[in-house]
Image: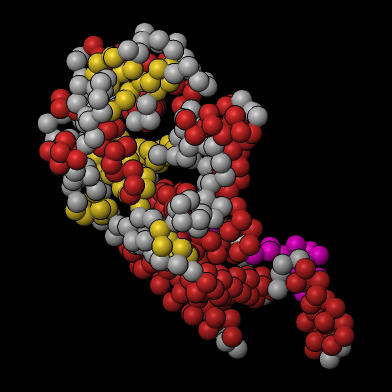
Amino acid sequence: MNIKFYNSLSNSLEDFNTQEDKKVSMYVCGPTVYNYPHIGNMRPVVVFDTLRRFLTYVGYDVTYVSNYTDVDDKIIKAAKQEGKSEKELTDFYIAEFEKTLKGIGSQVPSITPRVTEYMEKIIAYVENLVKIGAAYEKDGDVYFRVEKIKDYGALSGINVEDLRVGARIEENTQKESPLDFALWKKTEEGIKWDSPWGKGRPGWHTECCVMIDTIFPKHFIDIHGGGYDLKFPHHENEIAQSEATHGNKIAHYWMHNAFINFGNEKMSKSLGNVVYAKDMIAQYGGPVTRLVILNAHYRQPVNFTEETVKEAQQEIARMQMAYKQAALKLQANGVDLEKGQPVYIDKFLEALANDLNTANALKEVYDLLKEINQQIRSRDTDYALLNNQFKTLSDMFYVLGLDINYVKFDEEISSLYKEYLLSKENKDFAKSDEIRKLLIEKGVM
């Protein structure tokens, strides 16, 4: 299968090739854990979980790393407000994030490092940048020399001269250039660590470089991902540090997802339209929330509106109905569901192989649903065909992360269903209705 992804670094669609045969190294910037995740935080969660699932399904061994930023000014402020230590606060919100992650149908990444666990390595990394002249210390703060990087701005398309002209140059600034960014910040407030430059904490951009360096020994990965807003300055500054340290741009493929909008407005706290993901999942369910996100290509904005949510509710209901009815019909007729084969999945996978086009992949799901419904309604059902269709649909749900299930027949359910059919045949509708309610409660019908 020819897999292509859009590389933000080259601004082009590229064939996907890995450093090691059938092995993928992938790092996605995770959340800063000082509050409940909003629905916008779920876009990269869903996108890169789906990417991981797809690559795994087609035979790759994926090491998927996504970090938790558990030291930050916002964390220190929130901990004070809630009367907790920084660790108590971040432990709580990491647990809440993982609940939400599972609620939306995503798998926990292979590795979920915390910044505070890497502090010694972060300090050593910054020390090396100072040693090689790529960084400098001023009164306990350490800054990176951007002008040491010839192609700074290659990822984001930012022009260094434009940045220089547009930068606000503060009086008595500590920095040699307004373009330079902080690697280490001295602090008297909140959580801090001893360093060669005094007590402080790291700048935001260094943590990901260090985690990638530590977890992936080659110091260069296949895929680096995150939201579009991270291209500059965060990912640009990661590349700058890696260029100085290792002479590479950290990753071969840079993939960025677009934003989530509400009513065609970008979601933001200033607009007052931030919605917690846990509330959206509680109200509409994980599959519906996830489907709204999957309905758009990952590089296009997602619009959460009454219309898009209602449409997703209807589609999930269609999927659930067809899936359960197919499972019921197959099992009631003694078909072994384990013998089904995903023989109708090729076009679905081809859509995902073309830059993870989930919108086109979903079209294949909907086409398959029509064919399954035809077999369910047919008086002359081809059970082998239906079983293969059922297995194909199961695999599609897995790859898309849609948590849609069916109930496996056991002796009790099998007996109840036979009794239900017999009572219908005997026109004992009171009894058949009673049994039907039981089967509905058990999720069979």
Left or right side of 72 for 259: left
Name of the residue lying farthest toward the bottom: 427
Left or right side of 364 for 410: right
Nearer to me, 429 or 257:
257
Q: Is residue 28 visible in this depiction of the protein?
A: yes
Please tell me in which quadrant of the rendered image residue 382 appears. Answer: bottom right
As displayed, is residue 314 above or below residue 117? below
Which quarter of the figure is the N terminus placed in?
bottom left
Nearer to me, 409 or 161:
161
Name of the residue lying farthest toward the front: 171
Please tell me in which quadrant of the rendered image residue 158 appears. Answer: top left
Inspect the magenta stretch and tell me whether residue 126 lies in it: no
Name which residue lies at 55% across and 64% down. Answer: 288
Q: List x then y, in percent, for residue 86.
A: 57, 27
Inspect the magenta stretch and tell me whether residue 412 lies in it: yes
- Which span of residues is magenta-colored? 398-417
Which quarter of the figure is the C terminus placed in?
bottom right
Nearer to me, 174 or 191:
174
Nearer to me, 26 or 188:
188
Please tell me in which quadrant of the rendered image residue 212 appears. Answer: top left
Q: List x then y, in percent, for residue 36.
A: 57, 45
Left or right side of 147 for 362: right
Q: Is residue 349 visible in this depiction of the protein?
A: no
Q: List x then y, in percent, for residue 110.
A: 48, 37
As displayed, is residue 442 above or below residue 385? above
Name which residue lies at 20% across and 21% down. Answer: 176
Q: List x then y, in percent, for residue 247.
A: 18, 26
As displayed, is residue 200 above or below residue 102? above
Colour convention of the picture: secondary structure
Q: How many marks?
A: 0
As displayed, is residue 137 above or below residue 374? above
Name which residue lies at 22% across and 30% down. Answer: 169
